[in-house]
Amino acid sequence: MSESTPPQRASSKRRRNSDADAAQSKVRWIASLVSAPAILSILWPAILLAVGYAAWQQWGSQYVAHKYYGVQASAINVTSPPTYVRSDIITTVYRDAAMDKLSLMDEQACAKVASAFASNAWVRRVVGVRKIAGGRLHVRLEYRQPVAMVHVISRHPEHDGAGFFAIDGEGVLLPPSDFSRSETEGYLHIIVPGAYPTGGVGAEFGDSRVQAAALLAYLLHPYREKLGLTSIGVHGDLRQNPVVQLEIAGSEDRRWFWGSPPSEEAQGEPTAKMKLQSLIDGAPSGSDLRQVQYTPTPIVQSQRVIESPRVSAADDGARGR
C-alpha cells in the first residue's frame, strides 16, 4: 500500500475547508431567501403607513377640509343691513379676507370670521359668530350709521372743486360709492376750513375739528329735519381755545352757538342734552346755547338714538361738576 505524502494531505484539507465554506454560504443564502419575505411583510406596510400619514398631513387633510368643510359665501348669513348700506357685505368681506381658504374644521374659524367682518368699513362691531348645522355661519353685526357729510375741496386733479366725505358719529369714513351726490342733502354738512381726510375708508377722518363735529352730528341727526338744521361749523381759534367750539346753521340763515362738543363741556357749561332741549324748545336764532336756561321738558324723540356712550359720559361728568 502506498501512503499519502504531507503535501497531498494539506491539499485535501484545503478542499474539505473550501467545500465546508461553500456549504455554509449556500445555507446562509437559502436562509436569507426564506427569512426576507417575512421581514418585508412587516416592514413594507409600516413604511407605507408612515409615508401615507405624512402625505395626508401635508396634502390630504387640507384637500378634504377645503372640499367638504370649506367656508362658502352662500352659507354665510349676516344681520340684515340698513337701507343706506348699498355694498354687498358678505361678498366684499369674503373676497377681501380670502375666506375661501378657511375651513370650518379650524378651531379658530369663528374668530377668523369675526376678524374678517370687523375689518369692513360699514361694520361698527361684530356681536358674535355662530356655526349652524349644514356648514352654515350666522354673523351678528352692528352697523355704522352715517350722520354727516364733510365738505372738502378736492386735492386730486381728476376731481376738481368741492366734494363730500360721509362719516358716522365717531368720525369714521364710510364707503363713498354707497352715496349719490343728491343724497348728500339728506345729512348735516360739516364745514371746517382746510379739512381733508388723512386715512382711508373705515378709518377716522383724522382732524380733531371734524371728530368733534361728528359727535354733535350724531346727537342732532334724529332732529335734523324737524329743526331744519343744515350744517355744523367751527367757531374761534384753536390756538386760543384748545377745545373746539361749534356752531349750528339752519334754513333761512338761522344760527346758534353750540359751544364745546359733547363729552368736552367746560365747567358750568350745560350738557349736550340740555342744549338740545333748549334748541327743541325754540331757542331763537343767534342764541348762545351755553347761556339759554334749561327747561326740563322731556325730549319727544327716542332717547335710544342719542345715548352714545361718549355723550352719556359727558352728561355724567358735567353733573358731577
Image (spheres, rainbow, N blue to C red):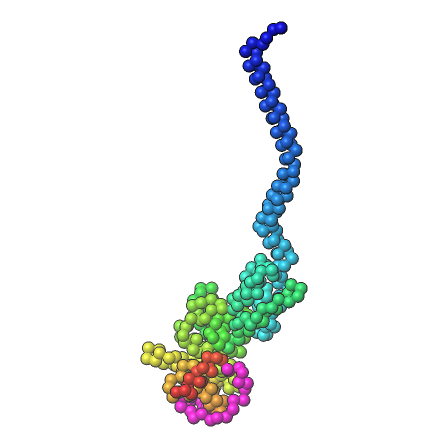
One can see residue 62 in this view = yes
Identify which residue is drawn at 58% across, 71% down: 140
Q: Is residue 70 rendered to the left or right of residue 238?
A: right
One can see residue 153 in this view = no
Q: Is residue 74 above or below residue 36?
A: below
Q: Quadrant of residue 319?
A: bottom left
Q: Quadrant of residue 244?
A: bottom left
Q: Is residue 45 rendered to the left or right of residue 157?
A: right
Outermost top residue: 1
Identify which residue is drawn at 45% across, 71% down: 204
Q: Is residue 46 above or below residue 255?
A: above
Q: As rendered, which of 41 and 6 lies closer to the eye?
A: 6
Outermost right residue: 134
Q: As rendered, which of 220 and 136 lies closer to the eye?
A: 136
Q: Is residue 128 above or below residue 8?
A: below
Of the 4 image quadrants, the one containing the C terminus is: bottom left
Identify which residue is drawn at 66% across, 33% down: 34
Outermost left residue: 240
Q: Residue 62's x, y, as percent?
A: 60, 54
Q: As rendered, which of 110 and 57 lies closer to the eye?
A: 57
Q: Is residue 201 rendered to the left or right of residue 21?
A: left
Of the 4 image quadrants, the one containing the N terminus is: top right
Q: Residue 14's x, y, as percent?
A: 57, 17
The residue stretch that appears in magenta = 283-307
Residue 291 belongs to magenta span: yes
Identify which residue is drawn at 42% across, 68% down: 198
Q: Residue 252's x, y, as percent?
A: 48, 86
Q: Residue 92's x, y, as percent?
A: 57, 64
Residue 107 belongs to magenta span: no
